[in-house]
Image: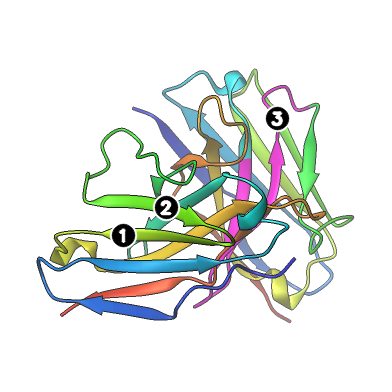
Amino acid sequence: QSALTQPASVSGSPGQSITISCTGTSSDVGANNYVSWYQQHPGKAPKLVIYDVSNRPSGVSYRFSGSKSGHTASLTISGLQAEDEADFYCSSYTSSSTPLVFGTGTKVTVL
Amino acid sequence: QVQLVESGGGLVKPGGSLRLSCAASGFNFSDYYMSWIRQAPGKGLEWVSYSSSSGRTIHYADSVKGRFTISRDNAKNSLYLQMNSLRDEDMAVYYCARGLEGWDYYYMDVWGKGTTVTVSS
């Protein structure tokens, strides 16, 4: 099972909105809604920011939103803030022999 | 507060073995699916294994199947990962993570700080 494909980096200025894509196949992102997103600051553990494509866990900022179309899921961060600078990973259930797969990761830079 | 603390990482030679532990506190451990996820130096996340709340259902990534064994002791609020026949590519930070309530292993809402496994001769 290959990793889901994400852009290596995305950047934006404070206050802007950015979108990170996560492209999979008909065996993973395209086949179910078990898609999630994690934020990881340098040297820290990942933090769940979106689950079930578009749901936010309690305590996660409303500025984070998720969506999916076909084989591609997306994470949008609105009103970009300096604290949003981190690595972001998508994840999906997959029908392959390895049931969970992560994306390649995207480094978000706040200019 | 809800917490996961991993331990047991260290330096091991290729072909060697190591046992990781994860101590849970602040929640009813026996109610939750638990997973191990790893991250090689400078690389992305890789899911390794999960255990159902009872320990009866277990699954592994193809990359570790036959070499790693996940287990749990609900009486001790602890999760374990026995790693045998270690390879260079197993070198990583290993995270213990809790499955989001009601969602089995699909999403992980609580993570430990990780324990580092170094494989080198």
Q: Which mark is residue B52?
A: 3
Q: Tell me the CA gap for discs 3 and 1.
A: 32 Å
Q: Residues within 10 Å of mark 1 (few under 14, many from 20)?
A: some
Q: Are marks 1 and 2 in contact (CB under 8 Å)?
A: yes
What is the quadrant of residue B52 in the picture?
top right
User: What is the crowding at mark 2: few (fewer than 14 residues within 10 Å), some, or many (at least 20)?
Assistant: some
Quadrant of the rendered image containing residue A59? top left
- Identify the residue at horizontal 46%, vertical 27% (top origin): B25
Depth check: B5 or A96 in front? A96
Label 3: few (<14), some or many (≥20) within 10 Å? many
Comparing B24 with B33, the one in front is B33
Quadrant placement of the C terminus of chain B: bottom right
Residue A36 place in picture, x, y as percent: 49, 49
Look at discs 3 and 1 and give the one toward the viewer: 1
Which quadrant does the N terminus of chain B fall into?
top left
User: Residue drawn 37% across and 57% down?
Assistant: A39
Residues at marks 3 and 2 on the same chain: no
The amino acid beneath tag 1 is Thr
* Mark 3 vs mark 2: in front: 2
Determine which residue is flagged by label 1.
A76
Mark 1 and mark 2 on one chain: yes
Q: Position of residue B21 (x, y in %)?
A: 62, 43
Horizontal and vertical percent for residue A15? 10, 65
The tag on residue A67 is: 2
* Segment colored magenta: B35-55
Q: Is residue B21 or residue A88 the one in the foreground?
A: A88
Residue type for callout 2: Ser
Q: CA distance from mark 3 to mark 2?
A: 28 Å
Q: Are marks 3 and 2 in contact (CB under 8 Å)?
A: no
Is B38 magenta? The answer is yes
Q: Is residue A90 visible?
A: yes
